[in-house]
Image (cartoon, rainbow, N blue to C red):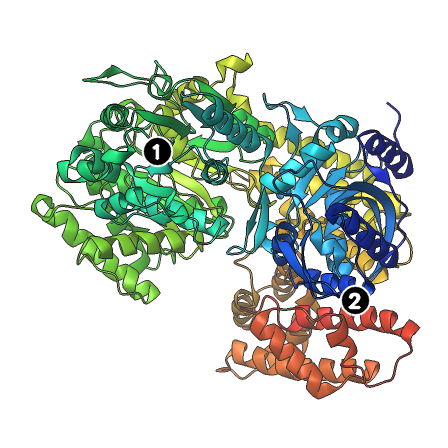
Amino acid sequence: MSKKSEAVLEAELITKLIGLGYENVKLSNEEDMLLNLKKQLEIHNDTTFSNAEFRKILNHLSASSVVKRAKILRDRYNLKKDDGTDKYIDFLNMDKWCQNEYQVSNQITMQGRAVNRYDVTLLVNGLPLVQIELKRSGVALKDAFNQVDRYQKDSFWASRGLFGFVQLFVISNSVNTRYFTNFADNSEDNTFKQTFSWTTEKNKHINDLGEFTSIFLEPCFLSKMICKYIVVSEVSNKLMVLRPYQYYAVENIVNQVNISVDGGYIWHTTGSGKTLTSFKTSQILKDNPNVKKILFVVDRKDLDYQTALEFNNFKEGSVDSTDNTSKLIKQLCSNTDDSKLIVTTIQKLNNAITTNKYLKQIEHLKDEKIVFIFDECHRSQFGDTHNKISEFFHKKQMFGFTGTPIFEDNSSKNHLGRRTTKDLFGERLHTYVIKDAINDENVLKFSVEYVADLKNKIDIESNKIDEKALMEAPRRLEKISDYILGVHLKKTHQRRFTAILCTSSVDCAIAYYDLFKKKKEEQKHNLNIATIFSYAQNEESKESFGILDEEKLEINESKVNYRNKEKLELYINDFNETFGTNHSLGDTQSYYRYYNDIATKVKKREVDILIVVNMFLTGFDSRYLNTIYVDKNLRFHGLIQAYSRTNRTLDEVKSQGNVVCFRNLKDQTDEAIGLFNDEEANEVITKEDVLMKSYAEYTEIFAKAVDSLYEITPNVQDVDALADENEEYTFISAFREIMRLKNSMASFSDFSWDDLGMSEEEFTDFSTKYTDLRDKIKRNKDKTKPSIFDEIDFELELLHTDEINVAYILALLANMRKGKKEGKDYEKQKKAVIDMIVGDSKLRSKRVLIEKFIDKNLFELEEDSNVKEAYDSFLEQEQTQAMNILCEEENLNKELFQKMISKYIFKKDMPRGAEILGLVMTKLKLKEKKEVEERVKLKINDFIEIFFDGMK
């Protein structure tokens, strides 16, 4: 297939859009857009506007954020007409979404910090709601995403900011196409991993731009996506669009409610965003006049709270969790709109339909249409409650969401017999299995290591012996804790991520905590360890058929294991001392607050390793959790649930979820992966679909990548001789692949540079040249000319090591000073320090400073001088000198410059256009402003990077 240029792709796309019903309109700039907007709004609202009236509309449309503009788009505006009458103006027909006015334009030019021309713009009622950016065939799709990111910074906000109304972006290189929401207000979501492919209902990707256009950009369907399937969250300050599998699930449940009396279940793999799916389902069903109540049912109090919190993050005040059964009854009896959607626990629901005093109060709901949505509907205790609900509510419809359904093979037998998810809910309404999620890059693969199989690691006679005495033997736990401390920094990329250690019992959790605490007191590690477990009597985990029994947050004081409670109180005191908190076990609420605080601190990476029995192994999501240490038996859905704590996507550094098993769970892992196949898709999920390659396989891949690099640059110095941008791009692409592979391999316990065919020193040298090249491109970039590097992502985070900072370097310098006096090889030590600096993307800007300090100051210090204090004094002098030179060269106001730097230190906000130009004391001509702004901005960025970034 021949490669198509951007111009050809653009022309073909516009032709296709015209065929779908879009009017082609030539709009060159914002002035043209405003004239067109006035005309389209007049058509859509069947009226005309005077210039004064249109100015009022434009003022109403002016808003400071994308989220606020999205709210304005969806609301009506009460326009006070010139004659004093009121006219409600509709910007988007939300109810009859096909009845809007559709146009397509291309190459609209906007002037912001740079002049940008946008590829293809789709306008609805004159407002640009979809922006499409194209790249020629063969160019990485990520480059198109980076182009959108650059436009966000350079010009989408410019002037009237009409492009702040964009709801969806589409990026394509003809053979790959993705969509995503406008992320301008939320930099956390500014990542290529938040872009999605559209699919068929069977999860087959629709990548071809032509096919995608016919389906997704068809005017009626596109409007439906914007009107129904974008969530505007003022609380979290972002727009969220449903992914295709979420869309199909919601549509199928809503259709089932409309046309049937049956229920059904949704099988969406763990980590695929069931909360957003269920929220959107509930939100749409709330508008159905035939539905009396929607009950979203969870099986634990903490999930009750968390779900309500997440629902309210999507839409403030949309739901109130039920603190107790009496409150649930009150909500069930209320007829207000805000009580139509209720989040509650299965325990409170069970109380409501089995207690006589409550039953009398809700008698009137027996024959009303009630929709139940059950989260994680595989729970074992659900069988009895299911029957009771069915007996009481005659017109109920029950829908279940699960990432791990119960089939015949993994069902447990009780007094109701063996019951599957299908037995409880009915037919499956949509399927999205772990293989689909991995293919879509919505979750990560797992890297599973079985330490029990490695020689000389754990000294036990047989991996299959499972007696409690052997598995919890002090010698064994000691070896495991030492092993964890030996690999933890590697697994978590120097504490960039966090981990869970799941244990077989409360006794085991206690033993591990005490071991880690003892080793910290012995200064063998500086990790923050926390734990939480139930202290009720007989809380041993049954682990029956893979179902993880939930530990109780609400504990009856008559059924307390006082030894376990006393231990937990000691550990809570440790937690309080570490974090300055005031938690206790005074009552259930106190325990619950401690639970929530631990969850928060794991998410914030303040807790390095959380030791648990069953808590946090289901229902807990943290994108910064990447490792689970497993010392318990797991099977089926319990195994998949536990492993899945680690595989949420985040960034390029988090390349997989790490699972370290201290029991031989290989057969159980293979069995669980095989069980959760979608038999309806006629595809078998293999281990290769879910698990990372072995370390040995990666070494072979790495060796080939090194050979490819050597073909371009046989030696490090050859990078300097690259002839042009094309050769430089080839080198950048080749070395970036090596960085990615090294990032994935580095977390393996067996990782060694000796296996890679490239030494660590050579990797560091190539890293230096790679980053030098990036700096040269950044420095010499001419914004008036297109470049192959305009949108390239160097992924420098793969070169950054959090533990190496200036304080760490200063400690090495102090040792170097001591070593020189003892006659050790000074030049070798100095090279090691400099290599460490240039090999880290955040520190390399400080190389000149630190070298100067070594050569001019370090060895002149008095015997008892403090190296850190001496460096601080040196840094202050250098900073003052650099500031004076910068202000003198660019004629900047020094006092304002210092204030701006102080603001950066406090808020971390990089200075922008008007603020930068406000520093310049020379009167500038209009044509000079842009050039001066860019030059001064670059110098300020360098100043901040050298003297402030990485100084912790």
**Left or right: residue 36 compared with residue 87:** right
Could you say which is closer to the camera, residue 385 or residue 560? 385
Q: Nearer the viewer, mark 1 or mark 2?
A: 2
Q: Which residue in the protein does label 2 denote? A: 52
Report if residue 928 is visible in the image: yes
- SS of the residue under disc 2: helix
Q: With respect to residue 836, does 894 lie above or below?
A: below
Tell me whether circle 1 and circle 2 mark residues in contact (CB < 8 Å). no
**At label 1, which amino acid type do we have?**
Phe
Vertical position of residue 710 compared to residue 814: above or below: above
- Residue 868 % position (x, y): 53, 76
Side of 92 where 575 appears, left or right:
left
Which secondary structure, mark 1?
Answer: loop
Which quadrant holds residue 552? Answer: top left
Q: Nearer the viewer, residue 95 or 692?
A: 95
Q: Is residue 27 above or below residue 345?
A: below
Q: Is residue 747 left or right of residue 480?
A: right
- Nearer-N-terminus badge (1/2): 2
Q: Which circle marks residue 699 in the picture? A: none
Instruction: Kindly identify the residue that appears in the image at 58 percent across and 45 percent down.
Output: 240
Q: Local crowd at mark 2 within 10 Å, few (<14), some, or many (≥20)?
A: few
Residue type at tag 2: Ala
Disc 1 residue crowd, few under 14, some 14–19, many 20+, Cα 10 Å: many
* 275 in relation to 418, above or below: below
Question: Which mark, by number, is residue 662?
Answer: 1
Taking depth in this image into account, of 283 and 946 the one nearest to the observer is 283
